[in-house]
Image (cartoon, rainbow, N blue to C red):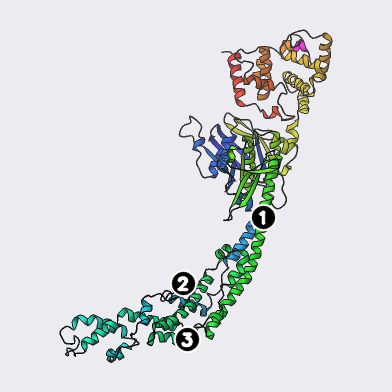
Amino acid sequence: MGEIKITIENCNNISHGELTLEENKLNIKYGMNGTGKSSLSTAISLISQGKDLTELKPFGSGDEVVPTINLSKNIRVVKVFNEEFVNNMVFKESKVIDNAFDVFIRTPDYEQKRAELDSRLTKLKVDIDTKPQIIQLKGDISAFMGKLELNATGSSIKNNTNYKAIIKKNNVYNIPEKLKKYSPIISDDQICISWIDWKSKGDSFDTKGICPYCSDELKTEFDEEKKTFKETYKKSDAQNLKNMLDLFENFHKYMPDDKFDSIIACIKEEKEESAISAILKAFMNEYVHISNQLNKISSFDKNVFRQSDINDIDKVLENMKLEKTIFNFFSNDEFFAIVDLINNSIEELRKEAQAIKAAIGKLQSVLKKTISTSQKDINDFLESAGIAYRVGINLDESGQAIATLQYVHDKESVQVDNIRNHLSWGERNAFSLVLFMFYAISENAELVVLDDPISSFDTNKKYAIIHRMFSKQSGALPRSFYKQTVLMLTHDFEPIIDFGVVGKLPAEALNTMFIKNSKGILKELEIDFKQDIKPVVQALASYVTDDTLGVVHRIAFLRKYYEHNGVENHLDAYNVLSSLIHGRDKCRYMDNTDMPQNEVQAGCAEIKKWIDDFDYSKLFNEIYNEEKLSELYFAETNEYLKIQLFRALFEVNPCKEIKEEDVLVKFINESYHIENDYAYYLDMVKYETVPEYIVNAIDDYMKKTYTKA
């Protein structure tokens, strides 16, 4: 496993710090409030988003001070659990979390099956565009598009310019009697259109009674010819008719000769409009059907497939085929061969569609199972944490997942809107933390940062959260932070007990450090579970018998040892020690009455089992006085032991500046009594867990009171 080294400078109260993370482990950094844990978390979050760290600049610092943080490894995806996540990602109106599909459903199994399906859908197309005959048919159909059109009901042909040109009695193919002499020109396809245009434009030049071309005198019948020509021929009509004939010629290869001839006769022969309309309407019905079917085939792809009811896909494909029996005009062997090619391609597509239907069925099965498993997973957590809510995950019509919250009362569920208004602070944050786990995993986070995630929860919720987030998971969705790279910054000692001492995580999945900020320098010290964390009674006993510690400390630890074992079992010894600690010249009770001699002797005998040279009078005269205790204080370098010396000095010479109810006094008293300590605690001598502001306050007092000017 690799390491990630973090260097941080000039971020709030951290002037410089170096920390190490071990990859694929839970890295617990345990430290007191004010150490700089949130500054570290924020710096990592900002740098992972490509933002600058200006907001972390220490107050009152100059322009030369620049906040920085560097990670030895390039980590692309960092997810941080903090207030920003709680405020922006979860519990918006009636939604439990944004992107519920990605968070709860988009699993590797789902992604694999979806990718396989998408790959097949991408290729889902009727294979007709590689066959020359079909390409030619599509081209001919496309070229005729819009030339003739049926009305909306399909009952008749629209009266557009092309249709008008066809039904006109006289045209370039039916020449009026008065213009028969022009037949050689009008019947010539190569010059006809240009000639009609030329002759039409010449109207303005024949007003002098002579031909504007040869200057011969115009005959008397010329005016009648001119009128007939003008009524019969226009360049645009002739051009349209010529174009229509060419387009119909393109369809000859798909028709029997007699059917083709019947259409051409509509143009070249003089027919009643009703007959022309009937023929062309029958032709157009077939043309429109072919065009529509080809469009269906061309547009059929994954989108059409997804929009169709999966159970109706066979019907959709069958409706794309061309049925030979309905054709009359398009009915020769060449056209039917093309129909066979198209229908065979659709049949091949049907086989692939069946395979895709099966793949979709598997995907839907995974989807259903994933939703069920995700719901059970998070709802089991909510139940174990004593949170009376349940999450429901549903898919809307567009396939988007929506996670909603239901309140459970007497086994009845009621959907919750405005979720933030209903969850308590503890419920909201406990719930958010587990939602964050799902979210971070769905985002493939390479580093997860938890900034003091559970310290404010009650024991029940702490256990539920720790168990769910870091336990080794199995089954369909093994989603947890087990063996992920996680940085947990906390001032709560319980995770260290649960993960390390109790052993909820194996050693290879855990790295635990104590962090301390001393005058802006952030350092870390490894915690050895076997050596550094002991049952409190065992630790106190070892301190009492450690003759490298001063007698003041051994006496303080011994009294605390008796408190843990039950003062009533060692009452005489406890009272002797208390009397000495409170600076009484001889053994007295708290009410200042003398202790009986037999109790004093019994108490001293018990104490000598631990401190063999214990002598009350000698200790009172030589140690428990201002001069000696202040001397010991200034000589001591260990912060925790300094606190014990100050407490002894405070009893000998109470400070009027410091009142009994001060927080300072409370902290000092707790170093002498068990009060709120846990059954296990970190080696306080080695790790000096005293907050710096406490030590600074005492130092200031001692210097002011006992340092000579």
Q: Are marks 2 and 1 in contact (CB under 8 Å)?
A: no
Query: Looking at the picture, which amino acid does disc 3 mark?
Result: Lys
Q: Nearer the viewer, mark 3 or mark 1?
A: 3
**Magenta-tinted stretch:** 611-618
Secondary element at image label 1 = helix
Position of 68 relative to 671 (above/below): below
| Magenta stretch encompasses residue 655 | no
C-alpha separation, residue under disc 2 versus residue under disc 3: 25 Å
Mark 2 crowd level (few <14, some 14–19, many ≥20, 10 Å Cα): few
**Viewer-proximal residue among 551 and 14:** 14
Tell whether 633 sits left or right of 275. right
Towards the viewer: 369 or 565: 369
Task: Please name the residue that numbered disc 1 is placed on.
Answer: 368
Q: Residue 117 falls in which quadrant of the image?
A: bottom right
* SS at circle 2: loop
| Dot 2 amino acid type | Thr
Q: Amino acid at mark 1?
A: Lys
Residue drawn at x 23%, y 87% as measured from the top left: 224
Give the main secondary structure of the magenta stretch.
Answer: loop
Q: Rounded to the nearest whole Å, what is the CA distance between mark 2 and mark 1?
A: 46 Å
